């Protein structure tokens, strides 16, 4: 089978459809950090844990957004931490565009990955918000595309505020509600359709 060119979904959101049966992704909102012919990597934005950022990465705690907890980014590598942050300002490109701060790598728009090995002071003045994730979601080559064909996910545009939502439990509904098509109606889908 010849692999056709994969249109990159990096920076977009995967929103679990109500029919997605995998409990790891029930009502999940996943920000895609990397998507190409080699596979896909993302983090679940709406799975806060009871673990405080200060309990595991104390130097970064004061930069973490509310709620100041570690989020479960997905079922893969739960023992690894990943930092995502918004750096306000335009993407580099034109004259006078700001350089990317040391310790931060742009993923999409104002959203980027934070080098958690770097001293937090390097980024303190630059970061608009920071969120720490334990683990990530990953798909092998073609796996996500198959799930999209099966109707497991909606693909929608992300907004910088999605990674720092102060009410992450409501993110699934709020992302769907802001869509300008029939997806806005899916936001009203009951948690348990059998009770309807």
Image: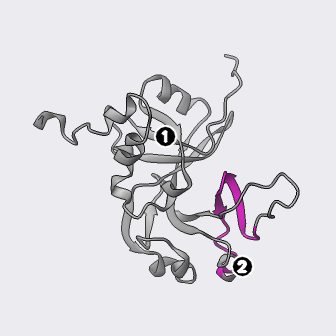
| Mark 1 closeness class: few <14, some 14–19, many ≥20 residues within 10 Å | many
Q: Is residue 125 left or right of residue 80?
A: right
Q: Marks 2 and 1: in contact by CB < 8 Å?
A: no
The residue that mark 2 highlights is: 122
| Mark 2 closeness class: few <14, some 14–19, many ≥20 residues within 10 Å | few
Q: Secondary structure beneath disc 2?
A: helix
Q: Is residue 187 left or right of residue 91?
A: left
Q: Secondary structure beneath disc 1?
A: strand
> Which range of residues does the magenta coloring cover?
101-120
Q: Does the segment drawn in magenta span residue 188? A: no
State the residue at coordinates (54%, 46%): 158
State the residue at coordinates (52%, 81%): 62
Q: Is residue 129 above or below residue 56?
A: above
Q: Is residue 189 left or right of residue 1?
A: left
Distance (Cα) linking label 1 and label 2: 32 Å
State the mark number for residue 14.
1
Q: Position of residue 195 (x, y in %)?
A: 11, 37
**Quarter placement of the C terminus:** top left
Q: Does the segment drawn in magenta span residue 115? A: yes
State the residue at coordinates (70%, 17%): 2
Q: Where is residue 186, by image quadrant?
A: top left
Q: Is residue 24 above or below residue 3?
A: below
**Res 125 visible:** yes
Q: Is residue 186 left or right of residue 84?
A: left
Q: Is residue 189 above or below residue 109?
A: above
Q: Position of residue 60 (x, y in %)?
A: 56, 78
Residue most toward the left? 195
Q: Position of residue 116 (x, y in %)?
A: 63, 71
């Amino acid at each position: 089978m010849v692999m056709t060119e994969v249109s990159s979904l990096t920076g977009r959101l995967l929103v679990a459809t109500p029919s997605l049966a995998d409990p790891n992704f029930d009502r999940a909102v996943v920000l895609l950090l990397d998507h190409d012919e080699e596979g896909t990597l993302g983090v679940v934005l709406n799975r806060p844990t009871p673990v405080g950022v200060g309990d595991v990465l104390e130097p970064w705690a004061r930069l973490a957004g509310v709620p100041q907890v570690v989020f479960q980014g997905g079922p893969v590598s739960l023992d690894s931490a990943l930092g995502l942050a918004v750096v306000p300002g335009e993407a580099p490109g034109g004259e006078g565009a700001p350089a990317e701060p040391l310790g931060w790598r742009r993923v999409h728009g104002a959203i980027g990955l934070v080098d958690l090995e770097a001293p937090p002071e390097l980024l303190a003045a630059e970061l608009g918000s920071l969120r720490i994730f334990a683990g990530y979601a990953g798909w092998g080559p073609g796996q996500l595309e198959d799930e999209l064909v099966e109707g497991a996910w909606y693909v929608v545009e992300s907004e910088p505020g999605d990674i720092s939502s102060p009410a992450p439990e409501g993110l699934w509904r709020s992302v769907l509600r802001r869509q300008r098509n029939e997806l806005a109606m899916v936001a009203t889908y009951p948690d348990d359709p059998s009770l309807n």
